Image (spheres, grey):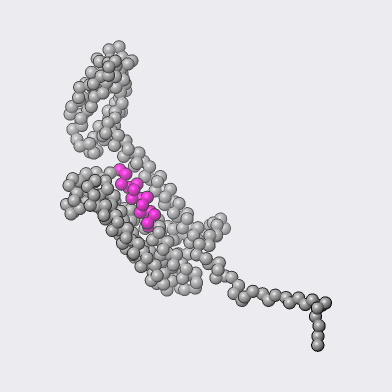
Amino acid sequence: MDARGAENPQSAVRTIEQRIRTTPGVVSVSAARFNDAGDTAVFSAVSANAPTSEKTENLVHTIRDQRPETEAGTGATFKVTGTTALNIDVAEKVRGALIPYLVVVVGLAVLLLLVVFRSVGIPLKAAFGFLLSVLAALGCIVAVFQWGWGASLLGVETTGPIMSLTPIFLVGIVFGLAMDYEVFLVSRIREAYVQGQAPGPAITTGFRYSARIVVAAALVMIFVFAGFITADESMVKMIGFGLAVAVLFDAFVVRLAFVPAVLALLGDKVSWLSRWLDRILPHVDVEGEALGCRHTAGPPPHDEKIDAGTHTST
């Protein structure tokens, strides 16, 4: 609290201290501690609820919103800070950035897959499956770490609100893994389709060759992330559990069940691309399709040049 503009700094601090003490939700206010000059002070207000409670968050906002009235007539100014207030501010910033972050990540993924596969259905299906995996992981985290379902099995001693950074970590890491599995599976299916197989046999062929890669890669990551569950730090335990569940769901439910089913239902329609998109999208030959269009008749015959001056006959 800055009381340098007050006629009586100590009286101004005590006035503000008393006004904050009468705020609903505040149970106590500590005695103000002044600097050597006596014109700046710090004191703490204790909420009646837990630091992570929604009521405590509302209390911080109430004190900030009522700051002009609290400061009125004192000549002093104050700011609300501390661990609890900082955690609330960080959580709000993260929540505000989550939607733009998702839009950028998913939008770039759709754009890149649109260029690679030259299809509208495949990128949209991939993005939808990715969102399903993230939501499933967040739901399991809430069930265990907030509601306490099976918390004792994972060594979770206390439950509470989910940490604000958890969705950011999940979205970033799960996105990369989900897109890897998508490309592994769909690229092989599309390769068989481009080579002339019907949609059904192409899905079977691609699934036969790619499913084992997806399963092996997913199992490795699941065991790696599950190892973090044994950590003592709650944040590490939560992130490890969420990532393990996300990879498990994404690989075995979304990529190995949902994706082939959707491709089989759509059939030839999955490769649809509007004419104007086909004109503006760059042609990126990732799978080497152009190699199959080359002329295979062999090199043209070379003309035999006969030097008239050296040709003789017998």
Identify the residue at image location x=31%, y=14%: 6
Looking at the picture, tell me which residue is in the foreground, 64 or 255: 255
Identify the residue at image location x=24%, y=52%: 229
Image coords of residue 23 (percent x, y): 22, 26
Looking at the picture, tell me which residue is in the foreground, 7 or 25: 7
User: Which SS does the magenta portion mostly show?
Assistant: helix
Looking at the picture, tell me which residue is in the foreground, 175 or 125: 175
Tell me the magenta residue range. Answer: 164-178
Image coords of residue 293 (percent x, y): 57, 70
Identify the residue at image location x=34%, y=46%: 168
Identify the residue at image location x=26%, y=52%: 228
Residue 169 included in the magenta stretch of the image: yes
Image coords of residue 46 (percent x, y): 20, 30
Image coords of residue 289 (percent x, y): 53, 67
Asked if residue 128 shows in the view, the reply is no
Quadrant of the drawing holding the N terminus? top left
Residue 189 located left or right of residue 144: right
Residue 147 located left or right of residue 220: left
Q: Is residue 204 above or below residue 169?
A: below
Q: Can you name the residue that lies furthest to the top here?
A: 7
Q: Is residue 10 above or below residue 263?
A: above
Asked if residue 281 shows in the view, the reply is yes
Quadrant of the drawing holding the C terminus? bottom right
Residue 117 located left or right of residue 297: left
Residue 27: name its quadrant.
top left
Residue 205 included in the magenta stretch of the image: no
Q: Can you name the residue that lies furthest to the bottom here?
A: 314
